[in-house]
Image (spheres, coloured by chain):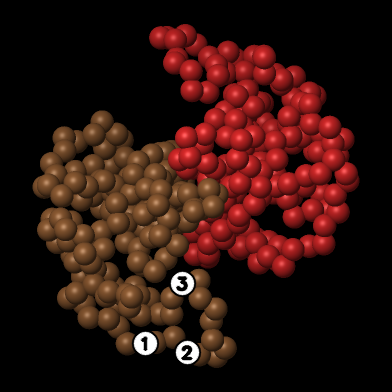
Chain colours: A red, B brown
Amino acid sequence: VASASPEPICQPLAPWRTALAKAIHGNRKLPSARYPQLATVGLDGRPANRTVVFRGFFAHTNCLQFITDARSAKAEQMTHQPAAELCWYFAQTREQFRMAGDLCLVGAHHPNPHLQASRVQLWQQLSDAARLQFNWPSPGDIRQDNQPFPTDVPNRDEPLIPAE
Amino acid sequence: VASASPEPICQPLAPWRTALAKAIHGNRKLPSARYPQLATVGLDGRPANRTVVFRGFFAHTNCLQFITDARSAKAEQMTHQPAAELCWYFAQTREQFRMAGDLCLVGAHHPNPHLQASRVQLWQQLSDAARLQFNWPSPGDIRQDNQPFPTDVPNRDEPLIPAE
C-alpha cells in the first residue's frame, strides 16, 4: 500500500494505475468512493479493518497516502506487522480493487525529507475540523463523563506531535 | 462475526443489534449498504480483505451470515485462523461499524443440522446468476485462453459440493 526507502523514490506507473484512476473518475459523484477499507494484523495475530480516506499518491510513485493519528491502534500495528490489504469497492461502477502491500508510517522523526514534505503538505490540506480531531483525547481511552472535547484547532503549518 | 457450537443456539439480542438495524434501514436506498468488508489473516500472517454480501442473521443469534465458495482463499484462511474483523461503512448516514469475531465455515459436512438448514436456505435464495458462479473454474486458477465459462446453473435445491 505504501513503502519508502530513505532515498528519493521514482517509480514507473504500475499497470493497475490506469484502471484505478478510471474507477475513481467513474465514481467521483460518491464521496465514499474515496473511502476504502484497510486491513492490518494486530499484535495478537487477529485482523483489524477500518475505513480510511485516500489522500492521493506520493509523488512519482505508486504509493497510496493516508493520514492516521499516531496514537491510533493501526499506527502501532503497522510498526510490528507492516503488511496490509486495502479493499476498495466502487459502488457506482460495481468494481472491487484488492491491493496488498506494506505500510510505512511517516511520523515526525521519519528521516526521508521527501516523505516529510508530503506529510506536512497533507496536514495543511486538512480542514480545521479534521485537524481538530488530533487534539481530542487519545483514541481508545475511556471517555471522562461529560468532559467536553477540546475545540482549539492545532497549528495549520506543522503537524501535531503527540505527547510521549 | 459468526460462531457455532454443535448445539442449537439461542442468544439474547446483542446491544449493537439495534444500532446496526437502524443503520441498515437508514441506508436501504444504497444496495452497497449490504456489502461490508471482511478482513482475515492468511497462512503467511498477512491480512486479506474483501467485500462480502450480508445475508442476514442466523436465526435467534447475533451471528452474521455470508456465502462463500468453499474453493476461495478465505475458506482456507478461516480454517487456520478463524479471527476476522468486519468493517461496515454506511455511506448515506456516514456511520462505521467494526465487528471483531470468529468465523465458522458451514460446509457440506458441518454436523449442526440448524446451520445446515440455513446453508441450504441461503443457497436457495440466491439468484441463478449467483449460483452459476459456483460452477465457474476454481478461483485463483490461471484462466484457459478463450475458454468460455460454464453456463449450466447448479441445482437450486442442494448447494453445490466442490470436487475433492
SS category of the residue bearing label 2:
loop
Q: Point out residue A118 in the picture as x, y percentages from the top left corner.
A: 80, 38
The answer to whether the residue labelled 2 contacts the one labelled 1, judged by CB atoms less than 8 Å apart, is: yes
Residue behind mark 3: B139
Q: Chain of mark 2?
A: B
Residue A114 drawn above or below residue A123:
below
SS category of the residue bearing label 3:
loop
Q: Are marks 2 and 1 on the same chain?
A: yes
Q: Which mark is residue B151?
A: 1
Residue type at tag 2: Pro
Residue type at tag 3: Pro
Q: What count of labels does the image hold?
A: 3
Rendered image quadrant of residue B130: bottom left
Q: Residues within 10 Å of mark 3 (few under 14, many from 20)?
A: some
SS category of the residue bearing label 1:
loop
Q: Point out residue B46 in the picture as x, y percentages from the top left corner.
A: 55, 49
- In space, the residues marked 2 and 3 are separated at their CA atoms by 15 Å
Residue behind mark 2: B148
Rendered image quadrant of residue A113: top right
Q: Is residue B8 left or right of residue A6?
A: left
Q: Is residue A114 left or right of residue A138?
A: right
The residue shown at (39%, 44%) is B83
The answer to whether the residue labelled 2 contacts the one labelled 3, judged by CB atoms less than 8 Å apart, is: no
Q: Are marks 3 and 1 on the same chain?
A: yes
Name the N-terminal-most of marks 3 and 1.
Answer: 3
Q: Is residue B108 left or right of residue B152?
A: left
Residue A94 drawn above or below residue B11:
below
Name the residue nearer the viewer: A104 or A66. Answer: A104
Name the N-terminal-most of marks 2 and 3.
Answer: 3
- In space, the residues marked 2 and 1 are separated at their CA atoms by 9 Å
Q: Residues within 10 Å of mark 2 (few under 14, many from 20)?
A: few
